[in-house]
Image (tube, rainbow, N blue to C red):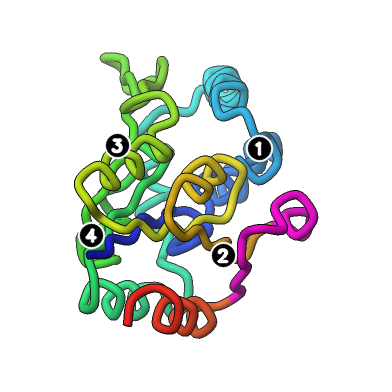
């Protein structure tokens, strides 16, 4: 019995923080887990920037409400959920995810949470658990699922390697050299074909 664990940003929706950077003009917020592999370092950097720039949760939520899924993402996810179980396993936050999950048809989501102050300031973040993506795969395998994982960034590598089958989707070019053992797909047609032929059917 299969179950598929997919990253969210870069796989089904654009990167949230890049959109925030574009809307606010704060170029420092463009960095993502494609650029910085240590998630804690990246998030602490973001928290310092948004404190300095006086951005609060409402400011960021307004940007997120305008983000649409990547072209073809909703249709692909609808197909995938029709043939197997799917969980979105993401390093995003509960306070960010609502509008995106609605546009994707409300798939199951494992993610993190933010610590929000009384004035709406983003004070900190809380991981669901350390190495949450990888541990989600380990837990599902312990339930006798064969796990297929799809991701695009450094923070997905643990999940992809732990899965029975890990697949990269539109990763940075250097991933071809850094992770030659992982197959790479560049569009939903390729990803669907790989899932159909190698994993699901």
Residue in front for this viewpoint, 87 or 198: 198
Q: Residues within 10 Å of mark 3 (few under 14, many from 20)?
A: some
- Which callout, 2 or 3, points at the residue further toward the start of the chain? 3
- Residues rendered magenta in the picture: 172-186
Q: Residues within 10 Å of mark 2 (few under 14, many from 20)?
A: many
- Which callout, 4 or 3, points at the residue further toward the start of the chain? 3
- Residue at the image point whose x is 55% and y is 40% from the top: 155
Badge 2 marks a residue whose secondary structure is strand
Q: Is residue 58 visible?
A: no
Badge 4 marks a residue whose secondary structure is loop
| Picture layout, residue 59 above or below residue 6 | above
Left or right side of 126 for 46: right
Give the x, y percent position of residue 175.
Answer: 72, 54
Q: What residue does disc 1 label?
A: 26
Q: What residue does disc 2 label?
A: 169
Q: What residue does disc 3 label?
A: 95
The C terminus, quarter of image: bottom left
Give the x, y percent position of residue 159.
Answer: 47, 45
Spatial CA span between label 2 and label 4: 19 Å
- Which callout, 1 or 4, points at the residue further toward the start of the chain? 1
Left or right side of 105 for 191: right
- Tally of numbered discs: 4
Residue in front for this viewpoint, 34 or 125: 34
Q: Which mark is residue 107?
A: 4
- Residue at the image point whose x is 42% and y is 38% from the top: 134
Q: Residues within 10 Å of mark 4 (few under 14, many from 20)?
A: some
Give the x, y percent position of residue 62.
Answer: 38, 46
């Amino acid at each position: 019995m299969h179950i598929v664990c997919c990253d969210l940003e870069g796989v089904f929706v654009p990167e949230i923080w890049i959109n925030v950077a574009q809307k606010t003009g704060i170029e420092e917020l463009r960095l993502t887990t494609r650029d910085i592999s240590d998630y804690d370092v990246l998030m602490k950097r973001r928290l310092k920037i948004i404190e300095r720039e006086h951005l609060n949760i409402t400011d960021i939520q307004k940007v997120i409400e305008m983000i649409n899924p990547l072209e073809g993402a909703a249709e692909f996810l609808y197909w995938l959920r029709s043939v197997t179980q799917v969980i979105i396993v993401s390093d995003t936050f509960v306070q960010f995810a609502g509008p995106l999950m609605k546009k994707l048809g409300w798939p199951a989501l494992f993610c993190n949470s933010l610590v929000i102050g009384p004035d709406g300031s983003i004070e900190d973040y809380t991981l669901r658990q350390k190495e949450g993506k990888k541990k989600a795969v380990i837990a599902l395998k312990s339930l006798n699922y064969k796990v297929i994982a799809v991701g695009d960034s450094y923070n997905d590598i643990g999940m992809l390697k732990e899965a029975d089958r890990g697949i990269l989707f539109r990763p940075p070019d250097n991933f071809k050299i850094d992770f030659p053992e992982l197959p790479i797909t560049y569009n939903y047609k390729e990803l669907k074909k790989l899932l159909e032929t190698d994993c699901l059917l």
